[in-house]
Amino acid sequence: MRQAQVRRVPAWCGLAGTTAACVGVLFVVLVLLLQWLRADLWWLDAQLSAHLHGPYGLLLRTAYCVLAAVMVWMAAGLHAALAPVACSRTVVGLFWAAAVGLSMVAIGDSWMPALAPAAAPMVHVLSADATFLCVIAALLLQSWYFRRDRWWAGHIVPVFGLGLVAFAALLFYITATSAPLGISQKIAIVLIVAWVVLVGVLLRRRTRAGAAPGRYSRDNAWVNQP
């Protein structure tokens, strides 16, 4: 009897996962540090966007752009690592759209407040809303599609569970206007980035699991299809 083995994936997928996990952890650490470093902003009320200006604003804007680039790379890595039946161009497109929106928030808040003060608030709000909408849709869809991949299906509970918690936190931030906007927004952001970290770690493990050569199952779900 032939032994089924995990399908091999490109080595760069593991590097994408490792990078996503490391950048995600560093981003969360930066967010937490800013709550202490920016004594002029009350951490319960000040949204993360308030930290884009003033001391350490450039650092946070740079972190936004790095996180956006990492999302693009991780989405491509997942698409290459997953079984064909678990892949979705829609998910990749949503992650990339979220990355564009996040970059627009960072870049727009760099020069627009000075050069186009009337348009800056609108661009920021539209870019931020698009980022939240696209990234939460992407991570929920990808979490659900993981069930179609034999290896990833074994990790769907923590991944999909964390995605649902992030969605609930984002929904609370949008609808619960009586709650402090700052802390509710930052909790939603941290949970979304935590999902990226978790999936990045799993992507690295998935790449290592398929690194050794060997025989392959003839299960059609594991065949690279055009």
Image (cartoon, rainbow, N blue to C red):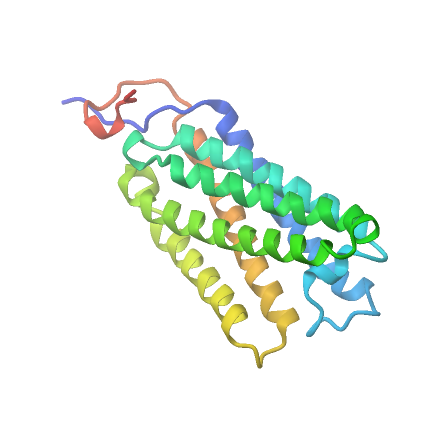
Q: Residue at x 42, y 28 (%)?
A: 80
Q: Position of residue 184 (x, y in %)?
A: 59, 70
Nearest the eye: 163 or 90: 90
Q: Position of residue 113 (x, y in %)?
A: 79, 53
Q: Residue at x 34, y 41 (%)?
A: 152
Q: Residue at x 59, y 38 (%)?
A: 70
Nearest the eye: 194 or 123: 123
Nearest the eye: 114 or 151: 114
User: Against 4, is 201 above or below?
Assistant: below
Q: Position of residue 76 (x, y in %)?
A: 48, 31
User: In which quadrant of the rendered view does residue 118 lie?
Assistant: bottom right
User: Against 76, is 41 above or below?
Assistant: below
Q: Is residue 216 rendered to the left or right of residue 77?
A: left
Q: Is residue 17 rendered to the left or right of residue 109?
A: left
User: Against 121, is 70 above or below?
Assistant: above
Q: Position of residue 124 (x, y in %)?
A: 66, 54
Q: Residue furthest left?
A: 1
Which quadrant of the figure contains the C terminus? top left
Nearest the eye: 65 or 161: 65
Q: Is residue 213 rendered to the left or right of residue 75?
A: left
Which quadrant of the figure contains the N terminus? top left
Q: Residue furthest front?
A: 118
Q: Residue at x 69, y 54 (%)?
A: 29
Tally of numbered tags: 0
User: Against 60, is 95 above or below?
Assistant: above
